[in-house]
Image (cartoon, rainbow, N blue to C red):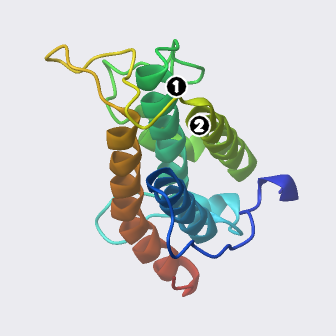
Amino acid sequence: MDESLAPPPRFQLSHAPSEITALVEFLDLHRLEFHERAWGLTDDQLHQTTGASDLTLGGLVKHMALVEHSWFEHRFLGMDEREPWASAPWDEDADWELTTAADDTGEELFTLYVDACNRCRDVIANAETLDQLSVRMDKNDKPWNLRWIMIHMIEEYARHLGHADLIRESIDGTTG
């Protein structure tokens, strides 16, 4: 697989960061740890399930690429959905990104993920403040601020890191 898609190097968290630095560092730490859990496996291993669940590491990688794009680019900036999300048949399969990941190679999955993370880092870096409001609204016509979105993303990664840990350990014994 293309090594440019590999997880970035580990880094030290700041001990007395500003609010934005703390949010960026913790989000990047969760991105890194998630990336490490799924990296280095074959395509077959990325498509492997564990127990009674249909969830795969490949599905999680594709899901997190979608979530990155959805929150930062689509909701926060108001951009149209990118492919492959724009043409996905969401009405037929609400979990399309999870169920179709088995059709993708590891390189395709990590390209989606790494590109989404890089674009979203740029969104954060170019935002005016953490108080900047999203262009798109929730179902009650209320926007989110960037602070809320970043905290939500940290929570999203924390939840899926647990899934990734269990799946990876069942594949090759690697633990986080």
Quarter holding the N terminus?
bottom right
Q: Mark 1 touching mark 2, by CB under 8 A?
A: yes
Q: Which mark is residue 34?
A: none
| Residue assigned mark 1 | 73
Query: Could you tell me which secondary element the residue under label 2 belongs to?
Result: helix
Say which residue appears at 76% left-offset and 61% top-offset: 6
Quick check: can you spot residue 2? no
Counting residues from the N terminus, which is met first, the one under dot 1 or under dot 2?
1
Query: Could you tell me which secondary element the residue under label 1 belongs to?
Result: helix
Seen in the picture, residue 91 relative to 146 is either above or below; the reply is above
Quick check: can you spot residue 172? yes
Say which residue appears at 62% left-offset and 41% top-offset: 121
Image coordinates for residue 67, horizontal then vertical, percent: 44, 38
Seen in the picture, residue 102 relative to 174 is either above or below; the reply is above
Q: Amino acid at mark 2?
A: Cys
Q: Amino acid at mark 1?
A: Glu
Say which residue appears at 52% left-offset and 25% top-offset: 73
Q: How many marks?
A: 2
| Residue assigned mark 2 | 120
Image coordinates for residue 117, horizontal then vertical, percent: 62, 43
Distance of mark 1 from mark 2, alpha carbons? Answer: 7 Å
Q: Quadrant of residue 115?
A: top right
Seen in the picture, residue 15 relative to 29 is either above or below; the reply is below
